[in-house]
Image: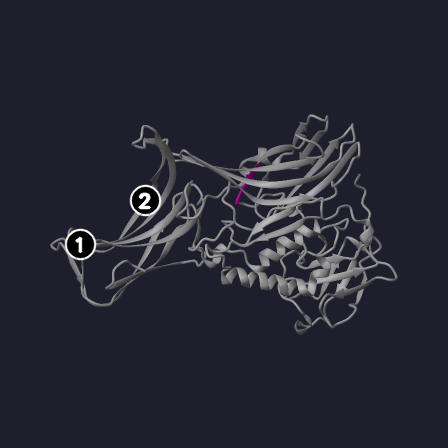
Amino acid sequence: MGNDNSSAITIDVDRNNLFYYSGETVSGIVRLNITEENLKTREIYISLIGEIGYTTTRSVPDGKGGSLSRNEYYKRQFYYKEVSLSGPSITQQEFIYDRGRYAWLFQIPLIENLPPTINKPDIYPRVRYFLQVIIDKSWYTSNIKYKKYLTVYPRVNLLENPQCLSSSIFKFKNRKDIKLKATFNKLGYISGENIQFTLEIQNPRKILILHNNLSILKCYQIAKGFDKCIVYKTILPKIVNLTNEHIMERFSIKIPSMRFPPSYKFQRENPNIFVHIYYMLELTVKVEGIFTNFHINVPITLGTERNSDLSQQQSFNPLSISYSSNPEQSICNDDDAPPDYDSIDKHSWGYIRTSGVNDYLTIQEILYQIITTVSTGGNVLINVGPTSYGKISPIYEERLRQMGSWLKVNGEAIYNSIPWKYQNDTINKNVCFSLSFQKNTIELILGAPISSSNTSITLLGSDVGSLNWRSAGTSGGIVIELSNIKICSFASNWAWVFKLQNVTPKQTNEK
């Protein structure tokens, strides 16, 4: 609302998520409610502003012969568009509004090639966009202002950068003569795509290789300020506690299906108006011994436009499928793999009083992280940030209770489980790890498991009993019939677990 006791301002735009691409038009309506006295104004206008914020540090005398470091905060506008909503006539200096409600439509274009929004509006360094309504009053009284923040991204089409769509090889060697070679099928992606690569390790001295981590780092420079953060981290399955002389494995890791600022570089003539955001894949190999771990940093491009290779990428199942395995075949134990860390607050490990509902992970996003991490052999640690008084806020409590209710029904698929040969199944296009049923899904087709005469399939927490199934064909696979499962049969929400017993993995020709 506005900053005046006698009037209130609101801005309603044409989309609820407040997200726009550069080149689009921001349209909406400004509403003014005058509740007490008449309002005298010279002009009412709305502006769309793009602004960067950054900090610098300089030394200042402390008065005792020494010096102190002082942070200085700067804001620089790189985009400004203004539209007048109302004003007096040529012969008037002021215009008077009586008590009541007023409304004005507006349209403001965004030019092409703008930098993406980075960080929250009140965090430095940052790139932010906002609409601002100003009621310009007389010189001796304060103006009334109201802001509404938007998210703006440039369109980045990967097809316009074909170099990032070609395969690339990265090599590294550590002090114990372990050679690592990572081959990526491409280095350009969009959210929700799979990062597909082959990892080859030459280990002539048969040193114990503990485990491998894959992280996606978001790096950005805004004017003179630089920062980076981990936006995704997972433990690679298969290569855990091995001493093999030669190891070669293929991986397919899905980038989270959330909106990331695309890779982009923006610069104006003013050297302080500079934005560069880019991403790195950090592949970390943990090796037994001191100073023997090594890292490979792989630059990648995140775009916003789908590329021609997307149709060939794997999709994930909309249901969490739990395959029953012999616990004695476990390739790791609780002491080997460190957990995959995540915080319910998307932007902080601590408590932020000003966070809104959209700043927290939904229970669907939390369960997606748990299911996909555990299915690939990882552990999960979920963080909650208490207040300064040590209290847990209600939204954290709600998420934890939701997790508990889901795990009470489906914990068999999480606790003491081990990864199967396959972590996802891609036969049915209507089946992916979206944690929900498609309304028209009456059967679930899986290509990875091979059935036997003793195969049985059940839905955890359901009273339906054994589900009907049939072989998908001579090449393997299973078709699970879902038509007899009613909504009232589900004992949990958000994600459902099918338990498959006495099945074997489909064999492939991969070596």
**Disc 1: which residue:** 141
Is residue 284 a member of the stretch shown in magenta? no
Q: Is residue 264 visible?
A: no
Q: Residue 146, how many percent across, how many down?
A: 31, 55
418 is higher (above) or lower (below) than 154:
below
- Judged left or right of residue 391, residue 380 is right
The part of the image, by quadrant, that contains residue 4 is bottom left
For the residue pair 149 and 507, the one nearer the viewer reads as 149
Please state which of the two labelled residues, at mark 2 or mark 1, is closer to the viewer.
1
Crowd around label 2: few <14 · some 14–19 · many ≥20 (10 Å): few
Q: Which residues are magenta?
A: 300-304
State which quarter of the image contains the C terminus: top right
Q: CA distance from mark 2 to mark 1?
A: 25 Å
Secondary structure mostly seen in the magenta stretch = strand
Q: Could you say which disc has been placed on residue 80 in the image?
A: 2
> Which of marks 1 and 2 precedes in the sequence?
2
For the residue pair 160 and 194, the one nearer the viewer reads as 194
Is residue 302 a member of the stretch shown in magenta? yes
- Judged left or right of residue 71, residue 322 is right
Q: Residue 71, how many percent across, how many down?
A: 36, 37
State which quarter of the image contains the N terminus: bottom left
For the residue pair 414 and 199, the one nearer the viewer reads as 414
Amino acid type, residue under disc 2 in the picture = Tyr
The part of the image, by quadrant, that contains residue 79 is top left
124 is higher (above) or lower (below) than 491:
above
Q: Residue 130, how many percent across, how many down?
A: 36, 50
Amino acid type, residue under disc 1 in the picture = Thr
- Helix, strand, or loop for circle 2? strand
Q: Residue at x 65, y 47 (%)?
A: 339
Q: Residue 125, how many percent across, how many down?
A: 42, 41
Q: Residue at x 50, y 63 (%)?
A: 394
